[in-house]
Image (cartoon, rainbow, N blue to C red):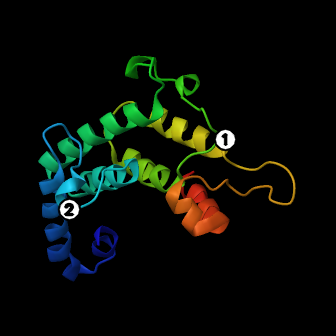
Amino acid sequence: LYTANKMGWTNTQPAFARGMRYVRALVGANGQVDYSLSGGRQTKTLAAMSAFCLLLSGEDTDKDMGEMMLTGLLQRELLSPNASSRALTETSVSRANSGSDVYAAYFLTRAVQHSQNPQSQKYANIIRTRLIAGQINEGDETGRFRARGRWQELGGPVFTTAVAAASL
């Protein structure tokens, strides 16, 4: 709806505003999304989607909430347990497995693009490094990204590769 509005479809604004009210209602004081209120559970993908929406909303309080959510999410998901945000480098990335959850990476990338956090470029580099680590570099499937996680397993290699490429 945000993109449609930016393209001139002005009739989407009321629906976007209603959606943003719903997202705001699910964000707790700790900056995490409480999906149990809607019968679901929090995942990094849903949290990244929510942070992205808040950063897009245009409201200063939403942007602040989105920044808080995004910073916490990125630190939890991208940094090894020993790393601090001050020591953020690509080598501090915890990469027990190659690759990344491309669906979460897409929304993290989009949120980082709209973030005012001075660490944003470093976070984007870490996301990019993780995604590239999941690309197959030999054989008949060279260039494809490994399917990892729920959404990649459902969407398969074409979905995984397309979303990973859009995130880079």
Question: Which residue is tagged 1?
Answer: 133
Q: Dot 2, crowdedness within 10 Å: few (<14), some or many (≥20)?
A: few
76 versus 12 height, above or below: above
Is residue 58 visible in the rendered image? The answer is: no
Q: Which residue is mark 2?
A: 38
Identify the residue shown where x is 23% and y is 49%: 33
Mark nearer the N terminus (2 vs 1)? 2
Q: Amino acid at mark 2?
A: Ser
Q: Quadrant of residue 83?
A: top left
Task: From the top left corner, tell me how far across and down residue 114 is, in percent.
Answer: 34, 48
Residue 144 screen position, x and y as percent: 72, 58
Q: Is residue 96 above or below residue 140?
A: above
Q: Quadrant of the rendered structure where residue 29 is?
A: top left
Q: Are marks 2 and 1 in contact (CB under 8 Å)?
A: no
- Label 2 to label 1, Cα distance in Å? 35 Å
Residue drawn at x 14%, y 47% as measured from the top left? 60
Q: Nearer the viewer, mark 2 or mark 1?
A: 2
